[in-house]
Image (cartoon, rainbow, N blue to C red):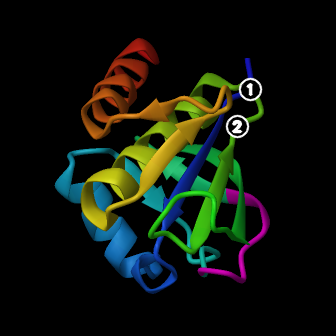
Amino acid sequence: MAQTYTAFLMRDLIPERAALQSAIKALGFKLTLEDDYVPFESSGYLPCTLDGEDAGFTIRFIDSQTVAGKDAGIILKSGGDPREETTIQMIAATLARSFNAVVYDKNNTKMTTDTLITSAKEAFAALD
């Protein structure tokens, strides 16, 4: 089943690729973003590598005042493939932990950072 997460952040805290990749690695996730990731320029399908295999997800940057104190958002969507779902869980968890994002799922439920990290790790373990 396709998943969607929306991460709300301050525009100036939306990370460049190197900072996001470093934060992903710090959480122990085996995910590598391609150079195609550019804040507020990337839109649509974004390829990446998950544990040495092709993966990807759909990304869109938005201006948003939905969450108090946040002025931008990143929408992360999977197409239903388990590798894509794991990828967006890892990115959402990283944005929450390292960049102070407030993350909501497709049901508009606010996700805690710990829940996102645990879900990402469980999803990754289930891929084997």
Q: Position of residue 76 (x, y in %)?
A: 64, 49
Q: Is residue 74 left or right of residue 8?
A: right
Name the residue at 53% across, 54% down: 7
Q: Which residue is mark 1?
A: 2
Q: Is residue 104 above or below residue 61?
A: above
Dot 1 and dot 2 residues touching (CB under 8 Å): yes
> Helix, strand or loop at disc 2?
loop
**Within 10 angstroms of label 2, few (less than 14), some, or many (20 or more) residues?**
many
Give the residue displayed 37% in from the left and 45% down from the top.
Answer: 93
Q: Position of residue 127 (x, y in %)?
A: 46, 18
Q: Quadrant of the N terminus?
A: top right
Q: Which residues are magenta?
A: 39-46
Is 31 above or below relative to 78? below
> Of label 1 and label 2, which has the lower sequence position?
1
In which quadrant of the rendered view does residue 15 lie? bottom left
Q: Nearer the viewer, residue 12 or 56?
A: 12
Q: Which residue is mark 2?
A: 78
Disc 1 versus disc 2: distance between alpha carbons? 5 Å
Q: Nearer the viewer, residue 97 or 29?
A: 97
Residue 123 in the image: above or below residue 3: above
Q: Amino acid at mark 2?
A: Ser
Residue sitting at 44 percent across and 70 percent down?
A: 69
> In the picture provided, is 11 more to the left or to the right than 38?
left
Q: Is residue 2 magenta?
A: no
Mark 1: few/some/many CA within 10 Å (<14, 14-19, 20+): few
Percent coordinates x, y for residue 117 in the rendering: 30, 34
